[in-house]
Amino acid sequence: MPSFKISIALLYFLGLLSLLTTKISSQPLSNHCPNTTTYSTTLNTTFHSNLNLLLSNFSTNATTPNNGFYNTTAGRSPNAVYGLFLCRGDVATDKCHTCVRDASQEILQLCANRTEATVWYDECLLRYSHRNIFSSMDTSIAFILINTQNVTEPVRFRQVLGNTMDELVTRAVSAGGSGKKFAGTVSNYSSFQKLYGLVQCTPDLSSDVCNTCLRDAIARLPSCCDIKLGARVLFPSCNIRYEFYPFFNLTASTPPASAPVPAPVLPLSPPAPPVSTSKGNGGLSTAEIIAIVVPIIVAVLLFSIGFWCIVMKKKKYNTIKEESGAADDITTVQSLSYDFATVEAATNNFSPANKIGEGGFGTVYKGTLPSGQEIAVKRLSTTSQQGAEEFKNEVLVVAKLQHRNLVRLLGFCLEGEEKILIYEFVPNKSLDYFLFDLVKQVLLDWSKRYKIIGGIARGILYLHEDSRLRIIHRDLKASNVLLDEDMNAKISDFGMAKIFGVDQTQGNTSRIVGTYGYMSPEYAMHGQFSVKSDVYSFGVLILEIITGKKNSNFYELDGAGDLLSYAWKHWRDGTPMELMDPTLADSHSRNEVMRCIHIGLLCVQEDVDARPSMASVVTMLNSYSITLQLPQHPPVFGHSRADSSIPKGLESDQSTSKSDQPTSKSVEWSVNEASITELHPR
């Protein structure tokens, strides 16, 4: 019990330390970019101009006292932009301004070319739309963040949390039409624990609507976050949060306690003379010296404890133990579980007529749930040696991801030997279905290809820098990029993804997974991987999209060793436009094609440090004012290796399993393109 008390105390000091820190994190909690209509920045549209005006207006108005809320409209219909920002009710004006300024810049990158977007930070929310969003409740999208540890007294916890949330909602909605509609409180949980809670609505909502919004958020807690040590639910119109440490400014959030008025005291005797104290050489008394030194010592101790807690908390939240049991990990996503009978019925008993694809780990079927929702069902092969591990990894990774350029995981099924992943159904199949087919590739004009390149870049950037975990995909290729009904790119297949800690930048492995032809040389040869490994794969993908040719079998064409060497030859000779797919002759933008070729060659440089980050790539794709570095010759890596390791007549990106010993060599092939599942580096 004493150690538990110490842990609670440390959590308290950690929260206190975070409140004393003035620097706002520029890391968004989440963002939402709905699949609505888009606008073009290249044409300098009226909507784009109005949006820039609106965001500039936000940054200005966040510096004035306005209860941390501001909404306005820029332009006139049909190009009007409606927007608002909301700062957390306890946040000071300077912090509010910093958060809104960062959000105004970040939202254009996270939701590029979207006519509707929302981004959440810890200290503010920013929203804009082409439709009127004022004074109306929006709970259509919810983001939920949880502390995965559980409380020890579930019954008492539910009672205290329920009472706390009821009190907070009552106080928030009673603020009236001009109030903040915000409340925070501290509840006694035990003799040494306190529960901290906070709720907030956008002030433009009526009290009744605010009450409905907050109650809806609270209703989500039992299914997602029951008995968790901390959780928050984020709606566009309201949010709630609770923790066992102070995560907000208590003074600004809780009602002031009414202090008793002291009764007048009549002196019964003359006042006693002041107590004399000895003075030091500096003129300070011993009491004054103690009063100065003791708080400094206490402050240093608190800072040291808080720093230690930050380090330990970061390790707790950002370390995934790959060797832990699958059953323990999957409990964190139990709400996503489907029973096998439901999946079987949705796919018509896994009918061959519903089969839409096959990969290295199993078959994909189209299905329809009883609600009418279409789904993609990935049924892992029971004979795959890596099936259980890849299944567990994909569930744990994808369940935490929310981005418009990533395929959304709807659920999973784990019964007996059945391991099934359930995704949103993406109707236009994969990029390679169009790109490498001489008939279908004409459907991908340059505007579609350029949009696909940008979407892939933003999706990978989210994985590398903007998601709650830093994730290396390790198998980025055309067949793992799906296309929705609007031909927006959605990255899929996270069975080989590698989770990094927030501060981790690279890693080594003796088990190489990925697809030959897309793997960076340092990864394929030595097992060294980093975010720059994905950058390399992205560079290969850009060149494939521009040329309409596949890197893995390009050695059969034009006498070139591979696509990268072919692209470099034309770049060096001053004829880069000859790389372009001939079907793009009438639809391309020369500047965009040239810039994409340039970026592609920068991404596939042999020197890892010379490759740009995905953040730089996204910036380079969206801005022509940035001067690009000159690329170097890409690595000549793979032709002879491919010839020596791939059986004759089969593509180099099919699924293989290989070790250094000839006696242990085995090959596992599938009908369609798949990935290397195991390969030990030299």
Image (spheres, rainbow, N blue to C red):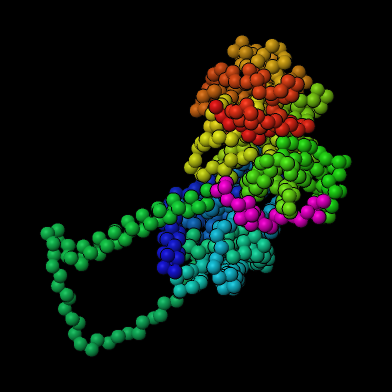
In the image, what residue occupies the spot 20% across and 82% down?
Answer: 271
Q: Nearer the viewer, residue 530 or 653?
A: 653
| 30 in the magenta segment | no
| Above/below status of 163 relative to 46 | below
The quarter of the picture where residue 616 lies is top right
Question: x and y percent of residue 654 in the render?
Answer: 71, 29
Residue 525 as seen in the image, left or right of residue 252: right
**Quadrant containing the N terminus in the rendered view:** bottom left
Instruction: Give the dominant element type of the magenta stretch: helix, strand or loop.
Output: helix
Give the vertical position of 494 relative to 257 (above or below).
above
The C terminus lies in quadrant: top right
Residue 323 included in the magenta stretch of the image: yes
Is there any visible trace of residue 110 in the rendered image? yes
Looking at the picture, does residue 459 appear above or below residue 565?
A: below
In the rendered image, residue 75, in percent from the top left (x then y), is placed at 67, 43
Residue at 52% of width from left, 62% of height from top? 243
Please give the name of the residue rendered at 13% of the width and 62% of the height, measured from the top-left corner: 280
- Magenta highlight range: 321-344
339 on left or right of 563: right
Residue 535 quadrant: top right
Which residue: 45% across, 53% down? 312
